[in-house]
Image (cartoon, grey):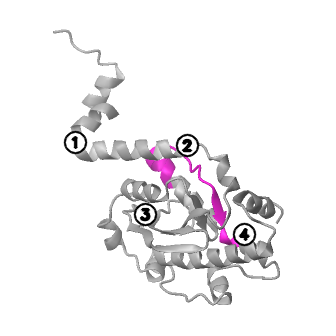
Amino acid sequence: MKEPNKGGGFWNNLRQGGMPSAIASIRGGESAQQTAQQMAFIRSLMREKRRPEVLHTPLSELETVIFDLETTGFSHQGGDEIMSFGAIRVVGEEIKEEECFYTLVKCGAVIPEHITRLTGISAEMTSAAPPLMDGLHNFMSFVGQRVLVAHGSAHDKAFLNAALWKTSKVQLTHRVLDTMMLARWLEPHRSNYTLDELLAIHEIPIVGRHHALEDARMTAKLWTKYIRQILQKGQVDTLGDLYAYLSRT
């Protein structure tokens, strides 16, 4: 039998202990197949184009997912990672209390002591949690094609993009709105727009702060208050109107 060409990447891969992704999927059994399916789902979701008709959706009917992430620090480029996802569905001004999502995820980054004190999340907790791919897939399944909302969304969006790229080599294509931007537009006189400050101002009880799901719940209450305030102004009716006004701030 003719010896395989040892210079080929395929055979080199095998000799060095590696294997092509297709064979790895077969050899890896259910776990590898599940990962491949999760990756395919995420990539498919990100390939879907933003539907322009959503811009004509009245804010009173708009479906959103308010979300929050807890992370090991503030620099995804410096090696910090996601520790947990929290999210809740909102339709118009109605918070769907029973339609929520939460998961811890396994992270390779060291969790500093001050982060554990702040969030209550320890290395032991994340080591027993599902891998990032599982948590990300389940989170994106919960989100679907709905508009995302977060407070100080730049942080969450950056970490979400890093996780999407790490697991699936894609970037987030969803529309993302920021309650901080709404606050700056509606309450321009304020000097502080932190979540704690705005929750206190709007008399929203602070419960379980720095827990991803609880932060998402409190942000959802802030979001619905702002939507109600916006609709009462009578100048903004649809998502497209809202984008137009926010672009002027």
Q: Which mark lies nearer to you, 3 or 4?
A: 4
Q: Which mark lies nearer to you, 1 or 3?
A: 1
Query: What crowding class fits label 2: few (fewer than 14 Cα within 10 Å), some (14-19), or many (20 or more)?
Result: few
Picture layout, residue 109 above or below residue 55: below
Query: What crowding class fits label 1: few (fewer than 14 Cα within 10 Å), some (14-19), or many (20 or more)?
Result: few
Q: Are marks 1 and 2 in contact (CB under 8 Å)?
A: no
Residue indicated by mark 1: 29
Q: Amino acid at mark 3?
A: Ala
- Per the image, is 117 magenta? no
Picture layout, residue 146 above or below residue 227: above
Q: Which mark lies nearer to you, 1 or 2?
A: 2
Residue at 40% across, 76% down: 121
Residue indicated by mark 3: 109
Residue indicated by mark 2: 48
Report x, y in % for residue 150: 60, 68
Q: CA distance from mark 2 to mark 3?
A: 32 Å
Task: Quadrant for the N terminus, please.
Answer: top left
Q: CA distance from mark 4 to mark 2?
A: 26 Å
- Secondary structure of the residue carrying tag 4 is helix
